[in-house]
Amino acid sequence: MISIDDLCVADNEGRRVLDGVHLELAAGQRLAIVGQTGSGKTTLALSLLGAVRPGLRVVGGQVNVARDDVLALAPAGLRRLRRDLVAYVPQDPAASLTPTLRVYRQIGEFAADRSPGAVGRRLAEVDLPDDERFQRRYPHQLSGGQQRRLALARSMARDPRLLVLDEPTAGLDGPVRGRVLDQITRLVETRGMTLVMITHDLHVAARAADRILVLNEGRVEEQGTTSAVLLQPEAAYTRELLAAVPDLSELQQRVLVDDRPGAAPVLRVANLVASYGSRAQRRRVVDDVSFDVAPGECVALLGMSGSGKTTVARCVIGTHVPDSGEVRLGEQALTPDVSRRSIDERRRVQLVPQDSAGSLNPRRRVAATITRVLRVLRGLPAEEAAEETLRLLGLVGLPARLADRFPAELSGGQRQRVTIARALAAGPQVLVCDEMTSSLDVRVQAAVLDLIDGLRRDLQLAVVLITHDLGVVARMADQVVVLHEAKVCEQGRVGDVLGDPQHEWTRELVRAASVNLDVVSRP
Amino acid sequence: MTMLYYIGRRVAAALLTLIAVSAVLLAASEVLPGDAASASLGITSTPEEVQALRDQLGLDRPLPVRYVEWMGGALRGDLGVSIMARRPVTEVVSAPLADTTLLVFLAAAVTVPLSVLIGVLGAVRRGRRLDRALTAGAVVTVSVPQFVMASLLVLVFSSTLHLLPAVSLAPVGGGPLDRPEILVLPVLALAGFATAWASRLVRAAVIDANAAPNVEAARLAGLPERVVVWRHVLPATVGPCVQAFAWLISGLFGGTAVVEQVFNYRGLSYVLVDAVRNHDTAVLEGVGLLLATIILVAFIIADVLALLANPKLRTATA
């Protein structure tokens, strides 16, 4: 079906984005292309459609799909290839739907089958309602999950023989991710299609693909059957990737610290209740949440999006005023509103945000960002602040030469380290980390998690870790609070909660997460 | 439901704007040196005569009183009396306003389709020879002052080719539509600049929409380029473009001031120049208010069109 031979793609500066890629895939096989951001995954996938992103050009090699030499096709031939043979669903499927077209037009635009009811059948195939009313809707009137399925149905409407999916599970977690993958696998199997799927997540690859190709900086590190690549990885890079993925099995390898007797909690959250919206539409998003964090301890708030975990964090740092309940720092209760907290109270509770790019002032250099905190919250004189800034950069593993950079000149992992240094600059007792690694690649994520773990031991920081990732919890947390629909459904020591979950929701989470690398042992 | 609410809010905002405009207009004519009484009586008048006229016109009453009175009249369609013409302002202004509006709408009728055509062509052929030529043409046209453009048109089409009249005087007792050929050069002079400007905005909007992920997806799905442009790119540009065209109407009214003078087209600019010279504040205020109303209506229409072109806003419920 697919045969790629020595494909080389370079950018305008001549840097190789893909370097000598070979790939053979038979009809009906399911391939996962695994790699980090910038490894060339999307470029490789797009080459199957004969597309090259602006700024890139093919400098050598051949791509054959079915019998076509894709890179040599004339525009008309290329259109025929894309229309009849290969379908592509981009990373953000919702954004790929033109907002001014109704559902039936989205499908009907492509449908090979123009008989009445054809659109409805296509919708039913991806578990979407097929009635008239649904078909007359616009994309914005669908939920995110429905948009995703509509984009899938749209790409399938031509009955392509090869389906190319770019990160089909980006932004999904837990059970939802599993359901999406199952649906894709089912469709591909019943239609006998060939699947090429891009992912950075080895769990996803393990679950949905029968072959894996590991891509690193444009080179193929390794390819083979899923079980061979995951169970007996040959390339050092693959082993590194596998080790970096946090998963449940790490619980067994970790030496869990027992309760520290006598360590008085530094942060106490008691009976927190918080809501959003005005009168009629007021919705309770946090309902009676309590937990304590001792110095040097890491408490994870675990939950899916919408479970209220970020609101808890906002109440702790004081950017959301709770309806009732209290947040105590040491002995004293904190004022709910951060703008009424004293400088010292603000200093002692610091946030590491999810979106490091958005939280750093784009016009302020790294050093200035950190120095400002030292001057404002700690009142250090200029010279001392400059020295301390360099020390902090060293502490979070950033070379001093980055001090003069602007945030846009840093990688995602470096930016996240800057936000950590900025938080540490205040000399906090409590560090609130809100999904701080969700936008990072596994290897970078592993490094950032290690950094936080080391810091909390060395500085006796109390860490509140907000995450949807069970693997991260298993790697980092001492205690875990599981949130589901605003309520705590389970909390306790991480070994107890994840090892023997009591609540139905926690069980489902654990089940979804444990369908990971061990599925490769399926026949 | 929500759409009516949205339009209602726009209309309310427009009314507030009109109130602000009227207040500024009255305040501005107040600070002009001299007053209507002395201007209309001329330099030979005695101070007693001036004072008598001031009393008659009510110019000595406090400003807020006069403002309320004026606004009350304006709501009933009465904009006061021109001091120079000794006739109601509405009567003095109506014919020139209609003629100027005719000019503006003809210019818009030329500009809108032409700038859409040029803008879309440029965007679709971005960076190619045609786009570069159109861009160069637009930059040159925008850079040439409007009176130079008007003079050039006269030089080419009337002085050299003798195709069209250089002076756009309507026949006595009739309107410009009785001699439509006098409209051609003023409309061209206005539309040239406007097209150059608007086509740049259209081009930018199309380029913007062309870069959207849904357009890339449509191309990767093998749709013909014609379908991609018509069905996936252009609908997204309607909103930004109609907004630009509302600005265009406002700009065109400004442009008529120069163009009318060059071509001797008896529109509003003559009324305004006379009114300023003679301190005929009632006329100034009346014209100001009428123009502001026309432009605000254009903006409301643009808002509604943009709303209709966006299913997300159109179908929003409470």
Image (spheres, coloured by chain):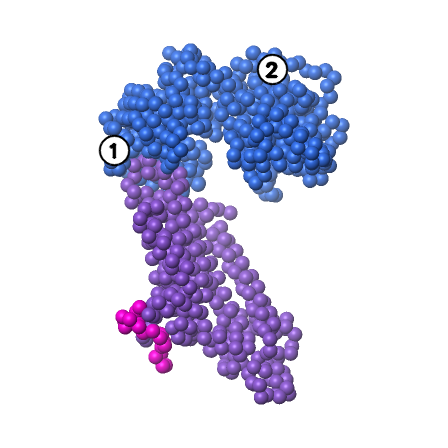
A320 sits to left or right of A213: right
Residue at which label 1 appears? A73
x, y percentage for residue B77? 50, 73
Q: Give me the chain that's blue.
A: A
What residue is drawn where x is 47% and y is 46%? B316
x, y percentage for residue A47? 33, 29
What residue is drawn where x is 59% and y is 32%? A403
Which of the labelled discs sits on residue A443, or is there none?
none
Evaluate whether residue A178 shows in this view: no
Q: Is residue A374 above or below residue A478?
A: below
Q: Is residue B160 magenta?
A: yes
Q: Is residue B255 magenta?
A: no
Query: Which SS does the magenta portion mostly show?
Result: loop
Please tell me the colour of chain B. Answer: purple
Q: Earlier in the sequence, mark 1 or mark 2?
A: 1
- Quadrant including the N terminus of chain A: top left
Evaluate whether residue A264 shows in this view: yes
Which of the labelled discs sits on residue A496, or is there none?
2
**Amino acid type, mark 2:** Asp
Mark 1 vs mark 2, CA separation in Å: 59 Å
**Which chain is disc 2 placed on?**
A
**Amino acid type, mark 1:** Leu
The residue stretch that appears in magenta: B156-177
Front residue of A409/A143: it is A409
